[in-house]
Amino acid sequence: AQHTARHSAAVLTSWLNSLGLPSRAGCTQFPVGETELHRAFQDGHTLVELLHVLVPSAEAQLTAGVHKRSASSALAVANIELGLRLVWQANPVARNMPTALELYAATSRETVLRFVSELLAMYAERPAQRRAATVLGWADSALHFYGRGLSRPSLAPGFRTLPNDFRSGVSMACLLHHVTQVSGELGPNLSQVYWEPEGAFEHEQNFVLIVPLLAR
């Protein structure tokens, strides 16, 4: 069965264009258009340049293995294979991985989009989720000092109940109080917080209290 990319072509194009890839001879020039995205890796150099940005620790490996001049199709494919070997080390979803020849030929737009979607998931989304999990674990522990905490789904990948946990403004006020107590700065006056806000006015007053502290 044909699998589709998790992200839209517009999202994938925007992500690649935001990475600030340098303009180099023989590489795809960014920003690239959405309709041309599937051709971005044909030259053999662009994937290697992209991985220099996404995996800085692999710079020596990439520099040592790349063919500086890939005018021939064989050398272009060899450079793509070098990049793909590095991506495989990050344990991608196998069905989203193309062959070097598929990236070089660029005849299947969906194949390339699935690959870029996998790169976005591995090198941007998953690290962000791990960082978020660390921060949310800290927030949950800090909120326990105030008799509160985050709901379990807020701590799991997807963080699906997180908006509900912070909707009243109470948990954010508590976290700001906790942080400012540690730093010695002036924090929110918790006696002014509506702990069980009812109606739009009480919710609004909680945010009137905390927004200036978030903005400073």
Image: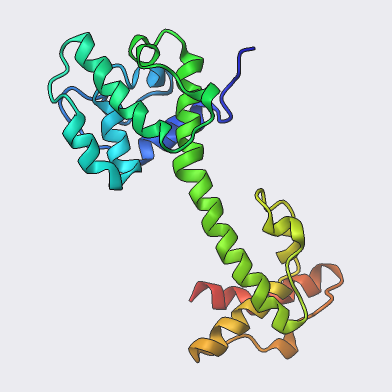
Q: Is residue 184 left or right of residue 33?
A: right
Q: Residue furthest right?
A: 198
Q: How is the image coloured?
A: rainbow
Where is residue 3? Give x, y as percent.
60, 18
Q: Quadrant of residue 80?
A: top left
At 71% from the left edge and 65% from the top edge, which residue is drawn?
166
Number of marks present in the image shown:
0
Residue at 12% x, 20% y: name it: 69
Q: Is residue 16 visible?
A: yes
Rendered position, 4 above or below 168: above
Q: Decide: is 69 above or below 184.
A: above
Left or right of 205: which side holds 123?
left
Q: Residue at x 60, y 79 (%)?
A: 176
Residue 173 visible to the viewer: no
Q: Which quadrant of the rendered structure holds the N terminus?
A: top right
Looking at the rendering, which quadrant does residue 116 occupy? top left
In front of the other: 90 or 164? 90
Residue 79: percent from left, percent from top: 25, 23
Quarter where residue 73 is shown: top left
* Between 161 and 94, the one nearer to me in the picture: 94
Nearer to the camera, 32 or 66: 66
81 on left or right of 70: right
Residue most extreme to the left: 69
**Place of residue 143 in the rendered image (x, y in percent of width and height, measured from the top left):** 69, 77
Residue located 32% across and 29% down the image: 83
Residue 17 on image: x %, y % = 36, 35
